[in-house]
Amino acid sequence: MTLVLGIESSCDDTAAAVIRRRADGSCEILSNVVWSEVEAHRPYGGVVPEIAARAHVERIDLMIAQAIEKSGHTYQDLNAIAATGGPGLIGGVMVGLTAGKAAALAHGLPLIPVNHLEGHALSVRMTEHAPFPYLLLLISGGHTQLIWVEGLGSYRRLGTTIDDAAGEAFDKTAKLLGLGQPGGPMVEKAAAGGRADRFDFPAPLARREGCDFSLSGLKTAVRLAAEAIPEPTAADIADLAASFQAALANHLAARTERAIASVETAAGPSPRLVVAGGVAANSAIRARLTDLTQSRGWSLIVPPSKYCTDNGAMIAWAGAERFAAGLAPATGEAMAFAPRARWPLAEPPQGREHGGGKKGPKA
Ligand code: KG4
Ligand code: ZN
């Protein structure tokens, strides 16, 4: 059994958790606390790195103390401490990683710097039956990627966004439609009463090979359509939101279908698509992916929302999987680990690198 404290601070959530990984690979989440900074950033319509870093400094100790206390354990019971080492807003990553190093040194525990994307990639295994391999669609505020998860530490990136991330597209569209933040849930709510077939927004990259995504054109199309209506009514906004959401869901499904085709043989007799990231909460997208997977004979696994969005449990879990597999770094190496703003989980096949996502990545 492995008992691990996880610390997450790479974007606008200050989070900590204690999880237990049993010898059979199952997981027990003993505590999982998150302090969201949404309110601090709301006036600015996006995450402000400096405000985020300061907020992490103020709350990280409290979150860690609460996670330990709620778990019913003490530091003496822990086997390791895992902290996000990147990618993310560098100020925030520094805060969490330094807190992890300090606690590890003070209590004589191993420290495991965790790639935030690996946290997302493996989080499904905490709550669902998801043996390797599986196809992961990660759709969050800063990342939109298709990753073939072959095993622990073995990831192949099949596609990524060449411009905006899916959550970013939702947030920007919400802003231009005057719907408020966080954009995803606001757009989804507005779309519920709208007609998805009123506006025919373009299908991005329809003729482009591969599994990359492009979402900025969609947002521009929404802006042009909105500007063409002199005084948009609530019904117009609902139709714009619904048409945008449907176009985005179709694009995600179209690129995922290509990825499915490319790994079909390797996926074995019970192929699985796992969806993670905050945008996985969107029911129109889930419905579209349900249709897709059913038509291809794949199963669709979407973990509970609180483990899809940023959280400490997924960092603790990735650390525990590494610890149990003997992949925890030596103390000197862990203590020398420098926080990373960029840290690709899996390089693309030809070493191709796209930008994409917000400046100051939010995974
Ligand atoms: O994974 P997450 O909590 O944070 C990171 O980006 O790491 O994802 C947040 C993103 C935001 O852009 C938010 O607007 C989006 O997820 N989101 C949604 C929904 N709920 C959250 N997007 C679409 N529909 C939703 N229901
Ligand atoms: Zn994330």
Image: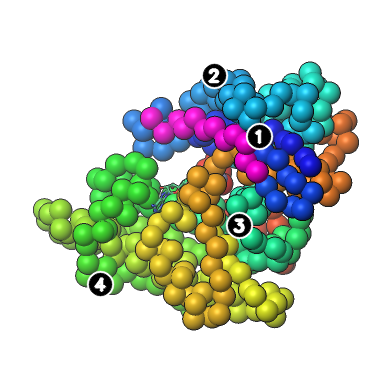
Say what secondary structure mark 2 lies in.
helix
x and y, in percent, of residue 102 in the image = 74, 21
Q: Quadrant of residue 198?
A: bottom left
Q: Amino acid at mark 2?
A: Glu
Whether label 2 lies within 8 Å of ligand 1 gets the answer no
- Nearest to the eye among marks 3 and 4: give it: 3
Q: Residues within 10 Å of mark 3 (few under 14, many from 20)?
A: some
Of the numbered discs 4 and 1, the one sitting upstream in the chain is 1
Q: Amino acid at mark 3?
A: Glu
Using residue 78 as the reference point, say whether residue 12 is left or right of it: left
| Cα–Cα span, label 3 and label 1 | 18 Å
Of the numbered discs 2 and 3, the one sitting upstream in the chain is 2
- Nearest to the eye among marks 2 and 1: give it: 1
Residue on which the image places disc 1: 18
Residue on which the image places disc 4: 197
Say what secondary structure mark 1 lies in.
strand
Can the viewer see residue 166?
Answer: yes
Q: Which residues are magenta?
A: 28-39
Residue on which the image places disc 3: 128
Q: Amino acid at mark 1?
A: Val
- Nearest to the eye among marks 4 and 1: give it: 1
Give the residue at x 51% y 56%: 139
Q: Quadrant of residue 191?
A: bottom left
The relative height of residue 204 versus residue 333 in the rendered view (above or below) is below
